[in-house]
Amino acid sequence: MMQFMLLFSRQGKLRLQKWYVAHPDKLKKKITRELITTILARKPKMCSFLEWRDVKVVYKRYASLYFCCAIEQEDNELLTLEIIHRYVELLDKYFGSVCELDIIFNFEKAYFILDELLLGGEIQETSKKNVLKAIAAQDLLQEDEVVEGALREIGLL
Amino acid sequence: MPAVRGDGMRGLAVFISDIRNCKSKEAEIKRINKELANIRSKFKGDKTLDGYQKKKYVCKLLFIFLLGHDIDFGHMEAVNLLSSNKYSEKQIGYLFISVLVNTNSDLIKLIIQSIKNDLSSRNPIHVNLALQCIANIGSKEMAEAFGNEIPKLLVSGDTMDVVKQSAALCLLRLFRTCQEVIPGGEWTSRIIHLLNDQHMGVVTAATSLIDALVKKNPEEYKGCVSLAVSRLSRIVTASYTDLQDYTYYFVPAPWLSVKLLRLLQNYTPPEDPGVRGRLNECLETILNKAQEPPKSKKVQHSNAKNAVLFEAISLIIHNDSEPNLLVRACNQLGQFLSNRETNLRYLALESMCLLATSEFSHEAVKKHQEVVILSMKMEKDVSVRQQAVDLLYAMCDKSNAEEIVQEMLNYLETADYSIREEMVLKVAILAEKYATDYTWYVDVILNLIRIAGDYVSEEVWYRVIQIVINRDDVQGYAAKTVFEALQAPACHENMVKVGGYVLGEFGNLIAGDQRSSPLVQFQLLHSKYHLCSPMTRALLLSTYIKFVNLFPEIKQQVQEVFRQHSNLRSADAELQQRASEYLQLSIIASTDVLATVLEEMPAFPERESSILAVLKRKKPGRVPEAAGDVKEGKGAPAPISAANHQAAVAQDGRGSPQVHNAVSGASASASASADLLGLSTPPASHPSAATASAPGHMGVLVDVLGDIYNSSTTNASGTASPTPAVNQQQNANNNYDAQGSYNPKKVSSPSSLANKLNLQLKPVEPLLEAGAQVQQLLNAECVEDYTGYVAQHLIYNVLHISDTPSMIITFIYNNVPQKLTVKLPLTINKFFEPTEMNGDAFFTRWKNLGGNQQRSQRIFKATQPMDNASTRAKLLGFGIQLLDGIDPNPENFVCAGIIHTRTQQIGCLLRLEPNKQAQMYRLTVRSSKESVSQEVCDLLAEQF
């Protein structure tokens, strides 16, 4: 089971955090700070996995963003790398060549996509097509509401 | 500003832009505070906000929270959004709650109600939103509220696949919070059969759930094994086109495959030969595929493929039943060891560690030894090097131990600091476990200390001493080797410890050689003495007293060292105590007594190496058990139980009991444990190894007054007192640590001061079990002031019975009555209450107490260095209040305190005037009672 996922920039700014285990805020901040420092200090060719406290940390850098997951001892490191990759692919497909700014300005979308991919720290849907379908359905609902609202405003409904 | 998708919130985007444009942290905080104030006023305002505005503000709060600021409002607005009929508003409400609401919030009831509504919605998107929220929060209340609902959703035929997926994982989350949510009975089979579901997404989610259920109740869910094997078989034999979107970079359903392989690791290999055969086929297919040329050059392809492969190898290792598969797995991993991907090398080393513990593949792993050694030396990433070290440790056996240990020692010189300590432990364990020739073992450990002394923990050098003591074939060699090692101009303190101990025990074995004559040995050790910590010095003092026994010809030189002021009057209580006791021992005791008391240490009982425990603590779950078996050391002496030990001791009965009593105070703790660990830091236990070895010694049976002696020595030396000066009463704890079963007949405290000091002891049980520890509280009340501490060098010398409070412990052991007399550290100053006062108050009282009847003065020469800090420490330790800035001469010390007795309270003022030029002190004590002034003055004058 994944314990948490963090997205942070090369400058060490946290962009997204998702916790699948309950920790007090103080501890979350401490973990985040320590982990960001640890990972930023690592060199590019180093192993993507590290033992950290009692979890295994798997991380990968995409452009200016680091994606970092903490998993438990029995979880598969390589496949966790691919969960990260799948998430990146989804963001990329959704935003159209995603960049850090997309995630900053649409952080709520980044959360919604993540919730379709992972739930309770376990993989929920591995099919890219299915996840995008679910997100598209959400957006459609929203757009209908916008249209409905607009029509109501001008008195057509 | 990039395009905002869906129904964008302009205000939010503007706010985020503002924050990003802030030039400084302060500007950012200012902007945020402004926004918070704005939102707060909006939420509090009379105007009702519409859904869009609420959504926007809640979203801003969320953003501010994610920037790392605390948010303490807005929860209610977010909860309101949950019941909005607009999906986008609902969704933001749920997001806020998932991120920000803690599980015991008051709002949880409202939230649960909203979730209930959405859960029964006909729109699956709403249902999923509710399920995701439950899974994100996963509290106990949620488990109670939805424990019935969700299992139904999961197995119902009407539920859509997307909802089933979420329901499975939602249930898993609730199950982790509260194990009762899963209904048993017919549900079991229905849940298991989700493994056969048409929809791969449902199967993937369900497998995670089943894996958790199996862990709790493997028997009930046993049926999942054959279903999992069939499913796995269908996947691995599928072509990558069969599974369409569940194929990931040409690898069919890697996530599901890994989950299924994981699930099977909860069980032993299937008993049904058909199922078992099919499983083995699957595993073979996976191994075969690893050999096929890759279908894509992308790292995603190789990662997904190898993820499945590693999980398959995990299962092969777990089953540990197919030698053929194990060897194939090992060869496959061997190939990875030279792969250009660091990740693969790392994982291969890790998996190989497990393979090394299987009897079927241990030999196959050993074939890769050279590559692994290279990895340890050459890998750029320390975590990979660490894995290589772990693997070398796991693959080590009798045949390759010397080589591996040597390579690890070589590497240790340049190894990363982060892994040194662990490597030292590993080398120490391997050297012990596989030593056929113990001279090799001694060499290895001494090399360890030489190369990485700072990282050699106490356990390591304790252990080498245990082994040398237990094996007489290596003692001479050990003495010779440490002697040589100590000749290095700079040698590590740990080397001095080992050297001191070994020479103290076995120095006589090399004394025949002129180059290592007794005097040379003694001088060599003593040349290190002043560079060492007090603990090591204490050990060396014990070595010296052993030398007095081993080499009577250097008795003079040794006694001189004991007599040195830096020892006899050391500010360190332990050193002081040892120096004075050992000096007395060397003067008083006859050669026979000395020989008995300082006899060679008896063999240690066989036990598991404590080093292993340290390693296990350091790396829980990562120390292979197979390597952990250290009990097979060849030719080790038969275990000697503590009981045997004492039986022998009791019959023996040599030596005068007085002397035994005399030393028992110091050695009590050390001897009771009969353990090198007793050597640990003083004063918790006294490392008086020399006295500990004495046979016929009471201390072997009882560990008395570990605590109280601390305070007694403290008292004598005048350093900070651990015993708080409680009003009118003194508390002291007695520790009884019994090693044999014995019968304390009476614990009493006769005292010639009975009318002046009221002592009360809480009674203890009449019979103490072997090994039991009893604490006995001693309450002392001062009825009237008394005198009672003779000169400090007589403290433990029972030959001079002095008029001090003491305790006699009598008990019966082996039907022989035993008696211990123990002094209590109860001098009059223990009843001090420190008193604060200002300069005026002090000098007014000082003048009032000016009469000859009240004053006591002593002028004496300093016997210890006159340094300010230690003087302060001594005065504070004396229990009296040190008053700073009162005396016009800053060099002087001025103190005040009240001695509480039952009959009266005696105010006491004190002034200590050092004269550094003359190396003299003048001590003046004034109190309302002459005898008290006298006594306090006498007690304190001894200390400087």
Image (cartoon, rainbow, N blue to C red):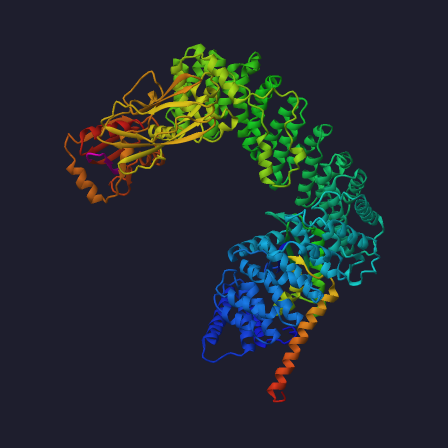
Is B360 on the left-hand or right-hand side of B130? right
Farthest-out residue, bottom: A155
- Towards the viewer: B157 or B379: B157
Q: x, y (%) of residue B329?
A: 78, 42
Q: Which residues are magenta?
A: B894-904
Confirm whether the magenta stretch covers residue B902.
yes
Q: Can you name the residue that lies furthest to the front here?
A: B186
In percent of width and height, residue B170 lies at 63, 60
Would residue B23 be found to the left or right of residue B872 on screen?
Answer: right
Please check the rendered image and state whether residue B420 is part of the magenta-colored stretch, yes or no: no
Total tally of numbered discs in the picture: 0
Q: Considering only vertical position in the picture, is B161 above or below A68?
A: below
Is any part of residue B504 visible from this angle? no
Q: Quadrant of residue B165?
A: bottom right
The reply, left or right, for residue B676 in relation to residue B447 is left
Viewport quadrant of the C terminus of chain A: bottom right
Between B884 and A59, the one lying in front of the other is: A59
The image quarter in which residue B426 lies: top right
Q: Is residue B393 above or below residue B55?
A: above
x and y percent of residue B637 in the render? 61, 19
Magenta stretch prevailing secondary structure: strand
Between B127 and B291, the one lying in front of the other is B127
Q: Is residue B164 visible?
A: yes
Q: Where B466 falls versus B184 (above or below)? A: above
At which x and y percent is residue B276? Answer: 79, 45
